Amino acid sequence: MDRKGVLVVISGFAGVGKGTLVKSLMEKYDNYALSVSMTTRAPRAGEQEGVSYFFVSREKFEQTIAEDGLIEYAEYVGNYYGTPKSYVEDQLSKGKDVILEIEIQGAHNIRKIYPDAVLIFVMPPSAEMLKERLTGRGTETAEVIKKRMDRAAQEATGIEDYDYIVVNDTVEQCTAKLREIIETAHCRPVMNEDFITAVRSELKAMAGEG
């Protein structure tokens, strides 16, 4: 039975540890393909072009929008973020599970285009822990941290639109939970339509023989 690729959307508040969890998934398992997002924000220390993000100008991003080259895009704290279409569809056709690490606004757009996608929201153990993680990064000013916390308060109203939540208490436990959810998603009838059709045809043939 051929295994179809699942489109997995992982969202969460800024600072909750989405990137660390996605990296852990990619290191532990080989059947995932990470969709690299396009963004207009400046690279952080250690980030690589084409690996962390495709870093582009605002003009280039808006040109890509006009050319219908993105599955989804959103503007977040003054910068654009989006998902290039061609890579995602190519990997899904090869049977890879494609991981998208995107913001909540983009996730809602994904659901409209790919209704079979699995949407997972990563939660912090508490709001206080989220603030501590943002502060501990040492990459943002107090003003940006406040904006991110304010944005988290707004995003908290959309969590119910997701299929699952996972709490990022420890990376190991959360990674295992994500893996479990994704594997379970492969058992949905919608992901096994060809197999169901084949067995159904065989059953009808056998019934006819009787």
Image (cartoon, rainbow, N blue to C red):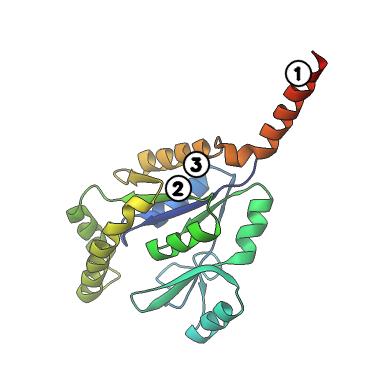
Which picture quadrant has residue 114? bottom right
In-front residue for pair 209/153: 209
In three-dimensional space, the C-alpha distance between marks 1 and 2, rounded to whole angstroms, equals 49 Å
Q: Is residue 148 above or below residue 5?
A: below
Please indicate whether residue 206 sits to the left or right of residue 166 in the image: right
Mark 2 vs 3, N-terminal side: 2
Mark 3 vs 1, N-terminal side: 3
Residue farthest toward the right in the current orientation of the protein: 209
Residue holding disc 3 = 182
Q: Is residue 166 above or below residue 62?
A: above
Which picture quadrant has residue 44? bottom left
The percent coordinates of residue 195 (x first, y second) are 69, 34
The percent coordinates of residue 157 (x first, y second) are 27, 58
- Amino acid at dot 2: Ser
Q: Quadrant of the C terminus?
A: top right
Q: Dot 3: few (<14), some (14–19), or many (≥20) neighbours within 10 Å? A: some
Residue holding disc 1 = 207
In three-dimensional space, the C-alpha distance between marks 3 and 1, rounded to whole angstroms, equals 36 Å
